[in-house]
Image (cartoon, helix red, strand yellow):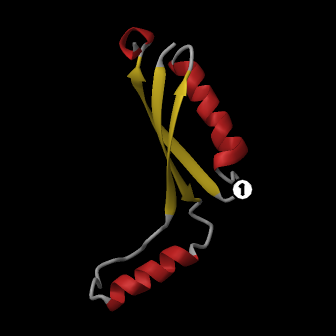
């Protein structure tokens, strides 16, 4: 069974206030980076999983994100998925 590596990017929905992003933006302005117009803070998650095929891996990742890794009310997510190893290459 193939092993997949997923990089999951979680961001706040555009309509949600981001106090951490605002604080970082303010800090950057105090450091002299006056050209910074906006900062939004998110999360980066790596997941390694085995699945029968890529479609199954994607379905499982959607379920993980919807049920645990994100708060669907205030956050969006996207992920990149790559094959890390197949049964032939894992041995």
Q: How many marks?
A: 1
- Position of residue 29 measured from the top left corner of the image (x, y, whole percent): 34, 87
Depth order, front residue of 36/43:
43
Residue at the spot x=53%, y=15% of the render? 53
- Position of residue 4 measured from the top left corner of the image (x, y, whole percent): 47, 26
Residue at the spot x=40%, y=25% of the render? 84
Q: Is residue 88 left or right of residue 78?
A: left
Depth order, front residue of 82/18:
82
For label 1, the SS is loop
Above or below for 21 versus 91 = below
**Label 1 packing within 10 angstroms: few (<14), some (14-19), many (20+):** few
Q: Quadrant of residue 36?
A: bottom left
Q: Is residue 3 left or right of residue 57?
A: left
Residue at the spot x=57%, y=78% of the render? 19
Q: Is residue 91 left or right of residue 69?
A: left
Identity of the residue furthest to the top in this view: 88
- Position of residue 38 measured from the top left corner of the image (x, y, whole percent): 42, 74
The residue labelled by disc 1 is 73
Q: Quadrant of the C terminus?
A: top left
Identity of the residue furthest to the bottom in this view: 30
Above or below for 4 versus 66 = above
Q: Is residue 83 left or right of residue 33?
A: right
- Position of residue 6 measured from the top left corner of the image (x, y, whole percent): 47, 36
Q: Quadrant of residue 18?
A: bottom right
Depth order, front residue of 86/58:
86
Depth order, front residue of 52/24:
52
């Amino acid at each position: 069974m193939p092993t997949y590596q997923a990089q999951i990017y979680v961001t706040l929905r555009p309509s949600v206030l981001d106090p951490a992003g605002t604080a970082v933006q303010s800090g950057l302005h105090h450091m002299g980076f006056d050209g910074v117009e906006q900062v939004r803070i998110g999360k980066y998650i790596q997941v390694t999983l085995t699945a029968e095929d890529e479609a199954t891996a994607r379905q499982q990742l959607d379920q993980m994100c919807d049920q645990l890794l994100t708060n669907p009310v205030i956050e969006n997510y996207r992920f990149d998925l790559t094959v890390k190893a197949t049964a032939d290459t894992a041995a």
